[in-house]
């Protein structure tokens, strides 16, 4: 059995050319660059994972319909009137599932009051971000992680944020 191999001088010349040419092919050189908005979205995906994750609006509408809820008029009303966290990324609307009771697809008790404190000081993306990052008022937990078990404390954190942002 005969296998073709390049003469040693050709291999060393190739290695030298690759090392000396800044534009030479490198297996990791052509990875897409992740910009700050993409990085922020990836961080939110990770942060919301424990509390139910993020869902695209069409998927949530299907889930809503799957629960036997008539239409998505209420969901559309909530989004339009900023009664739920909903933000645009990649030309898609995303909603954190933490705000919903998954068995009834209603808002968690106390959630509307929490959101009412914040919608006047945050845009949609910043609102989603606020819920996803650790908060000193919540002993370092994120509001998303604390919401189900400590909604009154999340409300206090939201009030503190609104007062701090107003100053």
Image (cartoon, rainbow, N blue to C red):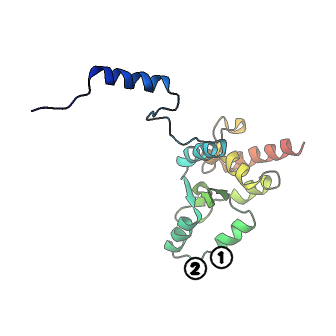
Q: Is residue 47 above or below residue 59?
A: above
Q: Quadrant of residue 82?
A: bottom right
Q: Is residue 153 or residue 144 the one in the foreground?
A: 144
Farthest residue, direction left: 1
Q: Is residue 42 or residue 54 the one in the foreground?
A: 42
Residue drawn at the location 66% of the way across and 46% of the way down = 37
Residue drawn at the location 43% of the way across and 35% of the way down = 27
Residue drawn at the location 53% of the way across and 48% of the way down = 49
Q: Quadrant location of the C terminus?
A: top right
Q: Are marks 2 and 1 in contact (CB under 8 Å)?
A: yes
Q: Is residue 27 above or below residue 46?
A: above
Q: Is residue 106 above or below residue 3?
A: below
Q: Is residue 47 or residue 4 the one in the foreground?
A: 4
Q: Quadrant of residue 134?
A: top right
Q: Which mark is residue 73?
A: 1
* Crowd band around label 1 with a 10 angstrom C-alpha radius: few (<14), some (14–19), many (20+): few
Q: Percent from the top left, x then y, of residue 127?
A: 72, 51
Q: What residue sits right under mark 2 in the picture?
A: 70
């Amino acid at each position: 059995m005969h296998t073709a191999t390049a003469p040693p001088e050709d291999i060393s010349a190739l290695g030298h050319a690759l090392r000396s040419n800044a534009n030479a092919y490198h297996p990791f050189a052509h990875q897409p660059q992740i910009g700050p908005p993409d990085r922020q979205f990836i961080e939110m995906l990770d942060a919301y994972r424990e509390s139910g994750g993020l869902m695209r609006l069409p998927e949530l509408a299907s889930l809503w319909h799957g629960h036997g809820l008539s239409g998505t008029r209420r969901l559309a009303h909530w989004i339009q009137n900023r009664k739920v966290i909903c933000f645009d990324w990649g030309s898609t609307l995303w909603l954190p599932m933490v705000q919903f009771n998954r068995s009834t697809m209603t808002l968690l008790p106390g959630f509307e009051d929490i959101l009412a404190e914040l919608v006047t000081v945050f845009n949609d993306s910043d609102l989603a971000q606020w819920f996803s990052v650790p908060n000193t008022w919540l002993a370092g937990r994120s509001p998303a992680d604390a919401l189900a078990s400590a909604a009154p404390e999340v409300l206090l954190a939201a009030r503190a944020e609104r007062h701090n942002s107003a100053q």
